[in-house]
Amino acid sequence: MEFHIEQEQDKSVIIIDKSKIIGPEAGGIQNAVLDLIEKEARIIVLDLSKVEYISSYGIGMLIYAHTTCTKRNIEFQVVGVNEKVLEILRIVHLDKIFNL
């Protein structure tokens, strides 16, 4: 599995265990976010501290997760973003949208 989930009080933390988020990984993470929403999570945190590269699929997954959580009044956070990934998020102006 490319990720695992830890529960911290009212937070569900998805910890990515791979250095790249590309097609298949993005789909699995997106499904995990949907599962947490169905389980009525109040805060979903995506930990990218091990991620060194994110593809357009990964960016799409982040946008989908953020949008879906926002529509359901669920707080969505992205943490542990390194400089390489942050630069990609800045290029597409997502650093201003996501709670990093």
Image (cartoon, grey):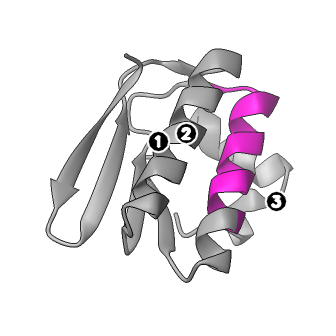
* Residue position for label 1: 32
In percent of width and height, residue 27 lies at 63, 29
Seen at 30% across and 57% down, the residue is: 12
Seen at 69% across and 42% down, the residue is: 61
Q: Of callouts 3 and 1, which one flags the residue occurring earlier in the amino acid sequence?
A: 1
Q: Is residue 32 left or right of residue 71?
A: left
| Residue 31, disc | 2
| Residue 93, disc | 3
Mark 2 Cα-neighbour bin, 10 Å: few <14, some 14–19, many ≥20: few
Whether tag 1 and tag 2 are in contact, CB under 8 A, the answer is: yes
Whether tag 2 and tag 3 are in contact, CB under 8 A, the answer is: no
In percent of width and height, residue 72 lies at 59, 78
In percent of width and height, residue 55 lies at 74, 26
Seen at 41% across and 55% down, the residue is: 36
Instruction: Give the number of the mark in front: 2 or 3.
Output: 2
Determine the image quadrant of residue 67. bottom right
Q: Main secondary structure of the magenta part?
A: helix
The residue range painted magenta reads: 54-67
Circle 1: element type: helix
Whether residue 82 is visible: no
Q: Does the magenta portion include 13?
A: no
